[in-house]
Amino acid sequence: MILIALGSNVSSLWGPPRSTLERTIGSLDSGGCRLIKASSLFETAPFGKTDQPNFVNAVVRIACEMTPEALLEQLQRLERLAGRVHSEKWGPRPLDLDIIDFDGLIRQEPPPVLPHPGIPQRPFVLAPIAEVAPRWRHPILRKTAAQMLEQLKGQSEGAILG
């Protein structure tokens, strides 16, 4: 199972954050990948750097014949097409795409690091994972997204957008 997190909090070349994620989700159902399931869109407070607009977040589950490196390259290409310029850590961005899990692969290098190291601390990733892959378990911690969310009780996982 391959899980990808999506986030946006400023308009992209494709429109406002919600439109950007919807278009990106459609783009992930091509180019050697097949969309299995997309989560709801969640509006969440920013993480790390809080003086910026709220994010729209989602997670998708895909099937893909690519290597993790090729998938990362494709995701970075989509970010650039949307107008992303990597400048400020945790700063505003028109599109942020992260490989969360790639078929349970565990590795530090080459990029991408798998599973994504920030999963257990990020309710805005865990809540959509629980929606699209309720039986998924973190490859190292062996906990479900719901179990990790429970450990973060009190931190907002965001509001589902209609």
Image: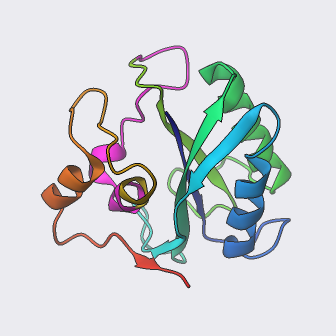
Can you say whether 43 is above or below 3 in the image?
below
Residue 88 visible: no
Q: Quadrant of residue 112?
A: top right
Q: How many marks?
A: 0
Q: 88 or 31: which is nearer to us?
A: 31
Q: How is the image coloured?
A: rainbow
Q: 155 or 90: which is nearer to us?
A: 155
**Secondary structure character of the magenta stretch overall:** loop
The quarter of the picture where the C terminus appears is bottom right
* Residue at 41% across, 55% down: 125
Q: Position of residue 136 (x, y in %)?
A: 34, 41
Can you say whether 37 is above or below 153 in the image?
above
Can you say whether 120 is above or below 140 in the image?
below
Q: 3 or 90: which is nearer to us?
A: 3
Magenta-drawn stretch contains 142: no
* Residue at 43% across, 20% down: 105
Left or right relative to 26: residue 140: left
Range drawn in magenta: 107-127
Q: Position of residue 109 (x, y in %)?
A: 48, 14
Q: Position of residue 43 (x, y in %)?
A: 49, 76
* Residue at 55% across, 42% down: 98
Residue 35 visible: yes
Left or right relative to 4: residue 26: right
* Residue at 26% across, 26% down: 140
